[in-house]
């Protein structure tokens, strides 16, 4: 009995010795799915992902100024590629973990029609978008409005959030009647969790390809490599799809 207890203690100690932490910068739109993935990652591997959420543009500035992030999950594919080119990321570790979808959303039931004609009606005071210079979803929103020939007309009504999380907050709190947000923020398993929305056709803006990359500070951290691999697993992909992303 004592031998068995000793063997179990040795196994647990060995497992604990191999478990580690990884510091992860995550685009705001991916908050909810990444929290679920991090929980599953910890259960399945023993590693802990320490998450920070924010705008991809701001993360880029922080990383190039020495922030201790080891993995970046960006809201675009340009920022990870740029970091790789600038030798701030581990070569060969960049991949697309999700393709996002833009949605025009209101917290009010029945407010946004299925074709987004509410934009042309213009019977609203505020339209929320993320900062297009820092957030790819904000850039996609501007592309969409430009394609609809409404950007200049609606400019006085546009309120900008620092990132997509703040853009969503403006709408969810009623400070803006509607806004362009990430589908992952307002839907689960193909249905809106509240309010009403119009999923913007992909033809109206550039693809929102979201890339991940291991940063130089994570090059020697096994937990960073483990997280990168885990994002490609069937379990992680199932979570990502449930939040409205494409793989």
Image (tube, helix red, strand yellow):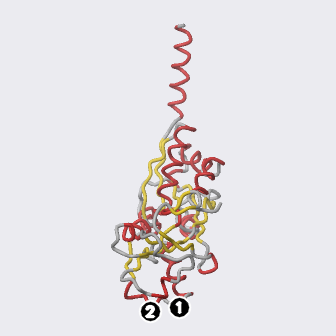
Q: Is residue 124 above or below residue 68?
A: below
Residue at horizontal 55%, vertical 50%?
219
Q: Quarter of the image containing the C terminus?
A: bottom right
Give me the C-alpha separation between circle 2 and circle 1: 8 Å
Q: Which mark is residue 153?
A: 2
Give residue 131's position: percent from left, percent from top. Answer: 42, 75
Residue at horizontal 60%, vertical 50%?
236
Q: Quarter of the image containing the N terminus?
A: top right
Crowd around label 1: few <14 · some 14–19 · many ≥20 (10 Å): few
Give residue 114's position: percent from left, percent from top. Answer: 56, 76
| View extreme (top): residue | 1
Badges 2 and 1: C-beta atoms under 8 Å apart? yes
Mark 1: which secondary structure? loop
Which residue occupies the foreground of this view, 58 or 127? 127
- Relative placement, left or right, of 157 versus 117 is left
Q: Which residue is mark 1?
A: 149
Give residue 45's position: percent from left, percent from top. Answer: 56, 38
Which residue occupies the foreground of this view, 165 or 176? 176
């Amino acid at each position: 009995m004592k031998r068995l207890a000793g063997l179990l203690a040795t196994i647990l100690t060995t497992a604990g010795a191999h478990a580690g932490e990884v510091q992860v910068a995550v685009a705001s739109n991916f908050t909810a799915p990444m929290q679920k993935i991090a929980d599953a990652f910890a259960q399945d591997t023993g590693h802990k992902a320490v998450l920070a959420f924010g705008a991809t543009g701001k993360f880029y500035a922080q990383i190039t100024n020495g922030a201790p992030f080891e993995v970046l999950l960006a809201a675009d594919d340009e920022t990870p590629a740029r970091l790789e080119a600038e030798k701030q990321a581990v070569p060969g570790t960049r991949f697309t973990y999700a393709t996002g979808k833009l949605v025009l959303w209101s917290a009010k039931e029945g407010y946004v029609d299925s074709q987004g004609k509410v934009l042309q009606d213009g019977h609203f005071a505020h339209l929320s978008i993320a900062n297009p210079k820092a957030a790819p979803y904000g850039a996609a929103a501007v592309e969409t409005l430009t394609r609809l020939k409404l950007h200049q007309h609606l400019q006085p009504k546009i309120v900008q959030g620092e990132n997509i999380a703040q853009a969503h907050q403006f709408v969810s709190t009623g400070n803006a009647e509607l806004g362009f947000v990430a589908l992952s923020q307002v839907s689960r398993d193909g249905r809106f969790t509240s309010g009403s929305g119009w999923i913007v056709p992909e033809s109206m803006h550039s693809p929102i390809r979201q890339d991940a990359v291991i940063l130089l500070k994570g090059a020697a951290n096994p937990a960073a490599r483990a997280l990168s691999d885990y994002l490609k697993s069937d379990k992680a992909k199932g979570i990502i799809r449930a939040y409205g992303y494409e793989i």
